[in-house]
Image (cartoon, grey):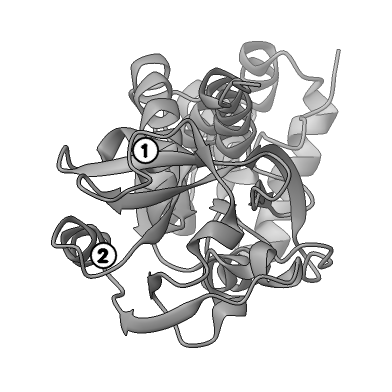
């Protein structure tokens, strides 16, 4: 016969003996040896410092200390059963929590499409989602405060300690123009043709904006209007106050009075989109990561050249 396994607590063996009225009957019910059950009870008595059973000629019965312990042992048994059920739910994705982060434009299509499929497949998993800059999410993943984040890390930059990056796609950027702009309706445009335009950006430090790869390639736009919010940016473009870059993943959400033109493939500024996880992601994060890869393949723009 086997001996009690690690998941079988001393309290559960105690309850089996109390219920059966003998070590032998409890061992039979548990599928263990009588000596193994006796050792478990002795270990619990050593731990509590009290004899929990009165040894009778035929069987045992609870002592006063055993009767005091009984309701507490039942509570421990119930909490252990709940813990095992919740742990099993984590493994099978029938429950649990996924803490998800993403930068703003990833929330236009990439993340919500993957999240919709994830919710349909695993409705028992609660997903919380926080939006913010990539540097913030990399820090939260490294600190163990997020399970997975969709980020755009600096080109060539190493992942922070405690973070593993999973490449999803290289995203082209488009230029947004007012409908009456001379370049609106063109098949493509060179960045040099837009050098004299007033560019609408989110930060005076262009290396911290969508312009980062273009600046690295030597393009320095003329900027004058700062707008953090996409609604404000595109509103300014529609009013003819300037032009701005739009990530391809967010193109479908652009307002109809704004024209999008592809930047020529010789100088299109791509940006790297990755998923960030701890080195050993949770089961839920691993499942969501697979869906992000699938969704990224569906959303990756097909070259028009």
Say left or right for 60 vs 38. Answer: left
Q: Quadrant of the N terminus?
A: top right
Give whichever of 64, 163 is nearer the camera: 163
Above or below, 177 relative to 46: above
* Most foreground residue, 116 or 26: 116
- SS label for mark 1: helix
**Residue at the spot 68% in from the left edge and 12% down from the top edge:** 28
- How far apart in space, not on screen, are marks 1 and 2 (Cα)? 14 Å
Where residue 221 appears, as percent x and y from the top left, is: 53, 75
Position of residue 51 in the picture relative to residue 216 (left or right):
left
Percent coordinates x, y for residue 61 in the rendering? 50, 37
Task: Classify mark 2: residues with Cα within 10 Å, few (<14), some (14-19) or many (20+).
Answer: many
User: Which dot marks residue 251?
Assistant: 1
Q: Residue at x 26, y 68 (%)?
A: 229
Q: Position of residue 274 (x, y in %)?
A: 66, 47
Q: Residues within 10 Å of mark 1 (few under 14, many from 20)?
A: some
**For residue 161, which quarter of the picture?**
bottom right
Position of residue 215 measured from the top left corner of the image (x, y, whole percent)? 67, 72
Quadrant where the C terminus lies?
top right
């Amino acid at each position: 016969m086997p001996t009690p396994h690690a998941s079988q607590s001393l309290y559960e063996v105690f309850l089996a003996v109390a219920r059966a009225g003998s070590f032998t009957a409890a061992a039979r019910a548990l599928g263990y040896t009588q000596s193994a059950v006796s050792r478990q009870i002795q270990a619990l008595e050593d731990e509590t410092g009290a004899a929990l059973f009165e040894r009778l000629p035929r069987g045992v019965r609870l002592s006063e200390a055993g009767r005091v312990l009984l309701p507490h042992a039942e509570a421990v048994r119930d909490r252990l059963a709940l813990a095992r059920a919740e742990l099993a739910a984590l493994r099978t994705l029938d429950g649990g929590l996924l803490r998800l982060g993403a930068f703003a434009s990833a929330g236009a299509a990439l993340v919500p499409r993957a999240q919709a499929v994830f919710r349909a497949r695993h409705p028992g998993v609660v997903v919380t989602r926080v939006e913010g800059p990539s540097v913030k999410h990399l820090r939260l993943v490294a600190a163990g405060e997020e399970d997975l984040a969709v980020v755009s890390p600096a080109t060539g930059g190493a992942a922070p300690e405690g973070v593993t990056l999973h490449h999803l796609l290289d995203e082209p950027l488009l230029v947004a123009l007012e409908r009456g702009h001379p370049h609106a309706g063109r098949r493509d445009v060179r960045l040099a043709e837009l050098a004299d335009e007033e560019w609408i950006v989110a930060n005076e430090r262009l290396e911290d904006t969508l312009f980062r790869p273009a600046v690295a390639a030597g393009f320095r736009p003329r900027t004058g209007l700062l707008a953090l919010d996409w609604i404000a940016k595109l509103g300014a473009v529609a009013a003819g106050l300037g032009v701005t870059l739009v990530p391809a993943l967010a193109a479908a959400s652009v307002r109809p009075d704004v024209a999008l033109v592809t930047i020529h493939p010789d100088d299109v500024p791509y940006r790297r989109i990755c998923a960030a996880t701890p080195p050993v992601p949770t089961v839920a994060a691993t499942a969501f990561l697979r869906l992000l890869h699938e969704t990224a393949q569906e959303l990756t723009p097909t070259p028009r050249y």
